[in-house]
Image (cartoon, helix red, strand yellow):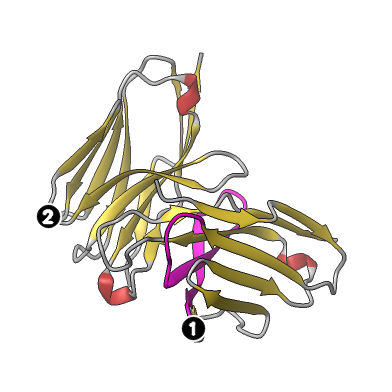
């Protein structure tokens, strides 16, 4: 079945550091990928839609200069948390679907636990 | 704006019990509804997807139903096992929202042995 790989699984770094998270579709091409953020015991909050070859679409309230998204190929999207601060600590998850707009299920990565000291 | 609610927020049952998790959504014009499982510190695993034209889907001990007109879905787990312990999330999709999923807050399930 369709597999989405996310890397790294965990990051611990100092405040002010920029952190890059990768999301790869391993056995299918994904023109669209989604980035979510999840707070403890809360549901997933969509941050942005990553579009291959064009700018990402950000949800209301999400700072695009803070959370940089690049979708340079049909199998890779990256999320960079720039100048991270403790309030950016969270669980970040990406997802993709082999055929957007269809009734195919979304497939999710295993998430990245980001901890900013 | 679509809102998704899951009840109960947490559930603890003894092994072997049949149980029902509930999901409701405010806008019935959905394209599909998906149930996911999330283990602690992990991503989401898709369990079942119900298209808007369908009433239910089954996979092993899991059965999901959909009543679009009333904005409700249920996930039925038969003969629960300790390995079923996880957080269960439901999510709805509307194509007008650009294929985005709107998630409920989840139900934390604990099956005691």
A75 or B12: nearer the eye?
A75
B45 or A32: nearer the eye?
A32
Instruction: Quadrant for residue A18, please give it.
Output: bottom right
| Span colored in magenta | A26-52
Instruction: Quadrant for residue B11, please give it.
Output: top left
According to the image, label 2 marks what residue? B53
Instruction: Answer with left or right where residue A96 lies relative to residue B19.
Output: right
| Residue for point 27% across, 76% down | B96
Q: How many marks?
A: 2
Chain letter of the residue beneath label 2 in the structure image: B
Tags 2 and 1 touching, CB below 8 Å: no
Chain letter of the residue beneath label 1 in the structure image: A
Mark 1 nearby-residue class (10 Å; few <14, some 14–19, many ≥20): few
Q: Is residue B62 above or below residue A92?
A: above
Question: Residue B52: x and y, percent?
Answer: 17, 56
Instruction: Answer with left or right where residue A44 lies relative to residue A117.
Output: left
Assess whether residue B6 is covered by the magenta stretch: no
Nearer the camera: disc 2 or disc 1: 1
Question: Residue B68: x and y, percent?
Answer: 16, 55
According to the image, label 1 marks what residue? A53
Judged from the image, the secondary structure of the residue bearing numbered disc 1 is: loop
Assess whether residue A37 is covered by the magenta stretch: yes
């Amino acid at each position: 079945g369709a597999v989405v790989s996310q890397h790294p699984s965990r990051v611990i770094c100092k405040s002010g550091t920029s952190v890059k998270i990768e999301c790869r579709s391993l056995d299918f091409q994904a023109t669209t990928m989604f980035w979510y953020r999840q707070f403890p015991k809360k549901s997933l909050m969509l941050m942005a839609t990553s579009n291959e070859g064009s700018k990402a679409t950000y949800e209301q309230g999400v700072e695009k200069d803070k959370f940089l998204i690049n979708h340079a190929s049909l199998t890779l999207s990256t999320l960079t948390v720039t100048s991270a601060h403790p309030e950016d600590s969270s669980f970040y998850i990406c997802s993709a679907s082999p055929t957007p707009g269809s009734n195919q299920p979304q497939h999710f990565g295993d998430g990245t636990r980001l901890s900013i000291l | 704006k679509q809102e998704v609610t899951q009840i109960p927020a947490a559930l603890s049952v003894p092994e072997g019990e049949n149980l029902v998790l509930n999901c409701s959504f405010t806008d019935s014009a959905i394209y599909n509804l998906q149930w996911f499982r999330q283990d602690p510190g992990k991503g989401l695993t898709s369990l079942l997807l119900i298209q808007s034209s369908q009433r239910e889907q089954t996979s092993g001990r899991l059965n999901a139903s959909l009543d679009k007109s009333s904005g409700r879905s249920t996930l039925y787990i038969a003969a629960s096992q300790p390995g079923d312990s996880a957080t269960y999330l439901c999510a709805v999709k509307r194509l007008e929202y650009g294929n985005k999923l709107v998630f409920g807050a989840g139900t934390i399930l604990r099956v005691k042995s």
